[in-house]
Amino acid sequence: MSKFTAEERIKIVLRFLNGHESISQIAQEVQVNKSIVSGWIRLYEQQGIEAFLKNYTSYSLQFKMDVLNYMNETGTSSYDAAAIFNISSPGMIRNWRNKFERGGINALEQKKKGRPTMKKEKEPNTKAKSPVEESMEALRAENERLRMENAYPKKVECFSSRTGKITNKIKAQVIFELNSEFDVVELVKVADIPRSTYYYWEKRLQREDKYATTKTAIEVIYHEHKGRYGYRRIAKELVKKNICHDPKTINRLMNEMGLKCMVRMKKYRSYRGKVGRIASNLLNRDFQADKMNEKWVTDVTEFHLFGEKRYLSPVLDLCNGEIIAYKVMNRPVYQLVGDMLEEAIRRLNPRDEVILHSDQGWHYQMKKYHKTLERHHIKQSMSRKGNCLDNAVIENFFGLLKSELLYLQEFENIEHFERELHEYIEYYNHKRMKAKLKDLSPVEYRTQILEVA
């Protein structure tokens, strides 16, 4: 395997996150094992770009034990552990585990380079303890050390379960919790941090958290929107509650709290070739509309859960991004699009002149569909073949829908998913803010801005 620079690794990861290529396709193209590419992706998701810019370093004995204990207690793989603890290679972790299984904790100690130093012979101690006393004292000390080494990783896992990282702050919190039971000096050694670092964090931990109110508000907003809001939108929601902070501060607080958004996925394709009349591209990527019922866009997307499929056909008004009509069915038949179109037509006023844009899916080439549009004086527009950017707005809506609902929630059955889908579209129209609408929801924008105009 050829050696990749940090910049090359980042580009490979971003190809997967921002595009439609699979890990296997990318790995085959760059000629590297797909498990390595998968490890880079996990590392990026946990640590960001800094993970690839980190210099090689040596790891302490305690750090190695922290990693192995965490894997043993949580069942985490070496690839996930490498991403969580920001370790350059999963193979290094497997090497630690093999050494520990063969030789115990002493096998993990890093051997010093060079010749061993000459030790001076100790002078005989006239007041030496008896062998029995020394043995009992050594047993007590060993027992206390084992208790401490057993308690420490459990506390670390508790404190780091949300963030997935073991920082000096978390180590200090653990020492602070255990200092009534164990000696601080020994705990600092187990945690492998300087004593001054612990006392620095101890002072800060004893202070009142000035962001306590903000963190509570962030958590309420985050869960109210079911994890769909990132730090920018949450910062704007906080302003409405008279809590003003820089978005970067909100981002930092959310990282500390282990709160983050999810990602989006791809859509259903309904193209079957030419089965009817293909309309011209009247919209021509001009997604701006000054009034309602001027430009509509539509498409069909698929959901596959519990061995069943559901198909969603919505109509989106480009003026405010509102879903004005939609239909959900278990088969992608013409009725799916036909019923949706009839529902959307009921939103029209007598003088409205609408352009309805879609892709070249077979539904939109049907004579019945053309006749319905002609009867209500709706101009039909179609994307060019194989060009999803011509209908980018509805594609973007499907991406949000799948990342904020399908891949974010757990569903009991297909009926539960359908209920949540209806609730999400209601939420999208009435509550979810959009930056291009002056941080209003589509319905708020229609009622507050358009009516005034």
Image: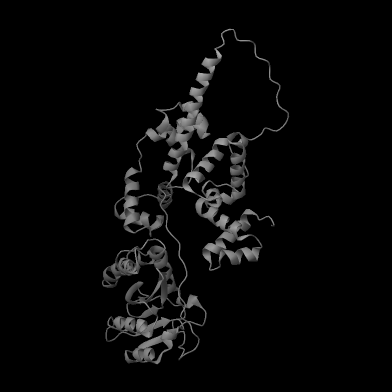
Residue 326: image quadrant is: bottom left
| Quadrant of the image containing the C terminus | bottom left
User: How far across and down, in percent of the image, does residue 163 sit?
Assistant: 44, 47
Foreground residue among 150 and 333: 150
Name, please, the residue furthest toward the front.
132
Residue visible at 43% across and 88% down? 365
Foreground residue among 142 and 197: 142
Residue visible at 42% across and 54% down? 260
Name, please, the residue furthest toward the right.
115
Vertical position of residue 94 compared to residue 435: above or below: above
| Left/right of residue 54 with respect to residue 254 in the rendered view | right
| Quadrant of the image containing the N terminus | bottom right
User: How far across and down, in percent of the image, does residue 330 sit?
Assistant: 37, 77
Vertical position of residue 7 compared to residue 357: above or below: above
| Left/right of residue 8 with respect to residue 283 in the rendered view | right
User: In this rendering, does residue 89 appear at all?
Assistant: no
User: How far across and down, in percent of the image, does residue 357 sit?
Assistant: 41, 82
Name, please, the residue furthest toward the top.
126
Residue 109: image quadrant is: top right
User: How far across and down, in percent of the image, does residue 385 sit?
Assistant: 51, 82
